[in-house]
Image: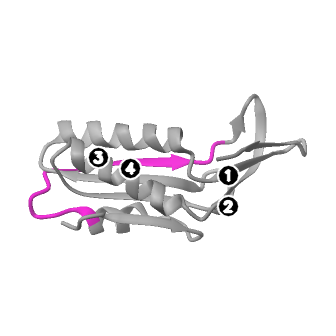
Amino acid sequence: MSDSGVIEITQKPISPERIINQVKTDGSGCVVTYVGLIRNSSQGKAVASVEYQDTKGNAAEKLKEIAAEIRQKWPIEDIAVCHRVGKLEVGDINFLVAIASAHRQEGLAACQYAVDRFKELLPTKKTETYTNGSTSVTSL
């Protein structure tokens, strides 16, 4: 078990299997995962792409903050919080949480918390581009 777990801000595709293998331990009864995807519609419009930018350079620190909060609240074995930046297409993985824990109750609760905190903290600037050419920007 590592203190901070796997914290990743990457431009490369995220591999759920690789991350699961990094966090599972001999004491893990489960690895609860959440895989966030780019969907084909948002705000009633067809999505062409979504771009995430770490404009302030602190996205990894925000992910570490989430991991630390989870370690304070639940007895988990390990944690991974990964966020992909750059231009992503429909179907691409943009966010992954993996919680290794001895029991599913803690793992499920911790995973839900991680996703909710990610949405609250918005660690990156998000630009959605729609097929009609319009865009929507969500800033930090």
Circle 3 packing at 10 Å, graded few (<14), some (14-19), many (20+), is many
Q: Name the residue under label 1.
A: 125
- CB-based contact (under 8 Å), mark 2 and mark 1: yes
Circle 4 packing at 10 Å, graded few (<14), some (14-19), many (20+), is many
Q: Name the residue under label 3.
A: 70
Furthest toward the left, the residue is 27
- CB-based contact (under 8 Å), mark 1 and mark 3: no
Vertical relation: 98 (above or below) 120: below
Q: What element carries label 3?
A: helix
Which residue sits at x=45%, y=66%? Answer: 8
Q: Name the residue under label 4.
A: 66
Dot 1 or dot 4, earlier in sequence: 4
Vertical relation: 80 (above or below) 47: below
* Residue 38 on the magenta segment: yes
* Residue 52 on the magenta segment: no
- Magenta extent: 23-39
Circle 2 packing at 10 Å, graded few (<14), some (14-19), many (20+), is few
Q: Is mark 1 on a helix, strand or loop?
A: strand
Dot 1 or dot 3, earlier in sequence: 3
Q: Is mark 2 on a helix, strand or loop?
A: loop
